Amino acid sequence: MDRETLDSIRQSVVEAGLVLARSSMTIGTYGNISQRVDADHIAITPSGRDYEQLTPTDIVVTDMEGTIAESSSAPVNQDFGHKPVADDSVNTKEDRSSVTVPLRPSSELPLHLEIYKSFPEAQAIVHTHSVYASALAAAHKDLPPVIEDLTQITGGAVRCTEYTMAGTKELGRNAVQAMEGGRSAALLANHGAVCWGRTMKEALATAQILEKAAQIYCIAHSFGTPFPLNEKTAEALHDFYLNHYSKRQRGEE
């Protein structure tokens, strides 16, 4: 792995985590983010670490089978339940907090790996617990293509998976199935949402627009019946996004 590229990718994941936390797309240590490093490795947020406290070296690197290729260590707070001993030189706060443990990849690593394996164009993945997307997921409802911007990115309805326990390969397989046809987002039943992008910026935008569209859909239901865009229009919008708009965003057109 190229060290300069890896450092840049780790920084990108950290910055995406701050966006997620500060836009209320998740709370605390929930949700997770990853980005491809190369054909054989990804960089993913560690398990149980607050986004506001992440540093680039905290981001764990694994291969495509989930084996850790690179990980740092983090201090463990041992104050809880600590029993004093006679020798204060051993019982200092500094000594107690100096114990470290290796950082583990997010428990949703299998979800990320299944998506990367199924969609070679996916370069980054964002998994959120945002409120309105999670509300639809709790109701086991698909999100129809009711708003143009989301339809442009995802290509149509964002489908909801069957319920599967978090942290399992089956959850990843169900997400991939919901994304059939090149969709870049899925709702995870009783859980949240997962989105991928050709860049980290696109993955984040997809997650943010998905949450906005879910909110609009729920509001529209409160005073009437939303009217989804038809399949022909959805295909045209997605084609325009793939072949023109996204290229303009990347400075390729």
Image (spheres, helix red, strand yellow):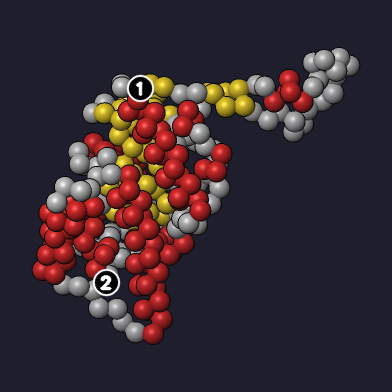
Q: Earlier in the sequence, mark 2 or mark 1?
A: 1
Circle on res. 90: none
Q: In the rendered view, would you say 93 is above or below 107?
A: above
Q: Quadrant of residue 183?
A: bottom left
- Whole-percent x and y of residue 172? 32, 43
- Whole-percent x and y of residue 50? 55, 41
The quadrant in which the N terminus is found is top left
Q: Amino acid at mark 1?
A: Arg
Q: Residue at x 75, y 30 (%)?
A: 79
Regarding residue 15, the answer to whether it shows in the image is yes
Classify mark 2: residues with Cα within 10 Å, few (<14), some (14-19) or many (20+): many
Q: Amino acid at mark 2?
A: Val
* Secondary structure beneath label 1: helix
Regarding residue 164, the answer to whether it shows in the image is no
Q: CA distance from mark 2 to mark 1?
A: 43 Å
Q: In the rendered view, would you say 171 is above or below 130?
A: above
Q: Are marks 2 and 1 in contact (CB under 8 Å)?
A: no
* Secondary structure beneath label 2: loop
Q: Describe residue 229's horizontal placement relative to residue 128 as left or right.
A: left
- Whole-percent x and y of residue 128? 42, 51
Q: Quadrant of residue 6?
A: top left
Q: Residue at x 23, y 58 (%)?
A: 153
Q: In the rendered view, would you say 231 is above or below 71?
A: below
Which residue occupies the extreme right position in the image?
A: 86
Towards the viewer: 58 or 166 = 58
- Name the residue that disc number 2 marks: 146
Towards the viewer: 170 or 69 = 69
- Name the residue that disc number 1 marks: 3
Q: Residue at x 23, y 36 (%)?
A: 117
Q: Describe residue 242's horizontal placement relative to residue 172 as left or right.
A: left
